[in-house]
Image: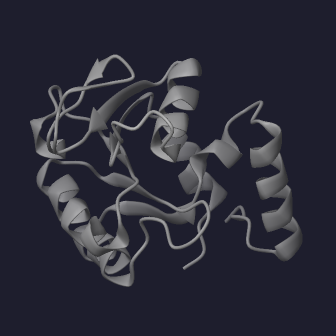
Amino acid sequence: MRNKLEDVDEFLSHRRVALVGASHDDKDFSRMVMRELLDRGYDVVPVNPGGGLIEGRAACAEIGAIEPPVEAAIVMTPPQVTEQIVRACAAAGVQRVWLHRGVGQGAVSAPAVQACQELGIRVIAGECPLMFLPNAGIVHRLHRLAKQIAGSYPARA
């Protein structure tokens, strides 16, 4: 399955998103993603089973606890639990899911992608949203360029 730029654009048009797998460790990459989105005006709701504050925002223990509900979720969990997260997203009415991948497997798993397809969830599998943000940092622009050169960058339909 190759991601489409239209799906990326549509996902990023949602200004209120959940970040499932937001870490309490301020050096974790999920925190960088959250800060970048916040800096660009997104209303990011962190989701972490431990709750607490993340980037000064109250973290929900699960996606179904977010009030009011979100329409889109970035998933940054280990791939072993991603299918379970996708199913929780569907139960919470979330119809757009981004399975993050920067380096390595990220949150992507075949069962999670299949669950998205079965549940009618629009999925972006295996990309880093920071590559697609305007004025992305140099590392993210280089990541985008490398994917374009390799032919693995999402295409327009």
**Residue found at x 16% / y 40%:** 50
Say whether residue 118 is left or right of residue 3. Answer: left
Say whether residue 55 is left or right of residue 128. Answer: left
**Residue found at x 33% / y 49%:** 21
Q: Quadrant of residue 85?
A: bottom left
**Residue found at x 69% / y 47%:** 131
In the rendered view of the protein, which quadrant contains the N terminus? bottom right
Q: Position of residue 94 (x, y in %)?
A: 25, 48
In the rendered view of the protein, which quadrant contains the C terminus? bottom right
| Residue 13 at least partly seen | no
Q: Quadrant of residue 46?
A: top left
- In the foreground, 54 or 101: 54
Colour scheme in the image?
one colour
Q: Position of residue 102 (x, y in %)?
A: 60, 60
Q: Is residue 44 above or below residue 118?
A: above
Q: Position of residue 42 (x, y in %)?
A: 47, 24
* Number of numbered discs: 0
Say whether residue 32 is left or right of residue 119. Answer: right
Q: Is residue 54 above or below residue 92?
A: above
Q: Residue furthest right?
A: 149
Q: Is residue 94 above or below residue 148?
A: above
Q: Position of residue 81 (x, y in %)?
A: 25, 68
| Residue 85 at least partly seen | yes
- In the foreground, 157 or 103: 103
**Residue found at x 51% / y 73%:** 105
- In the foreground, 43 or 21: 21
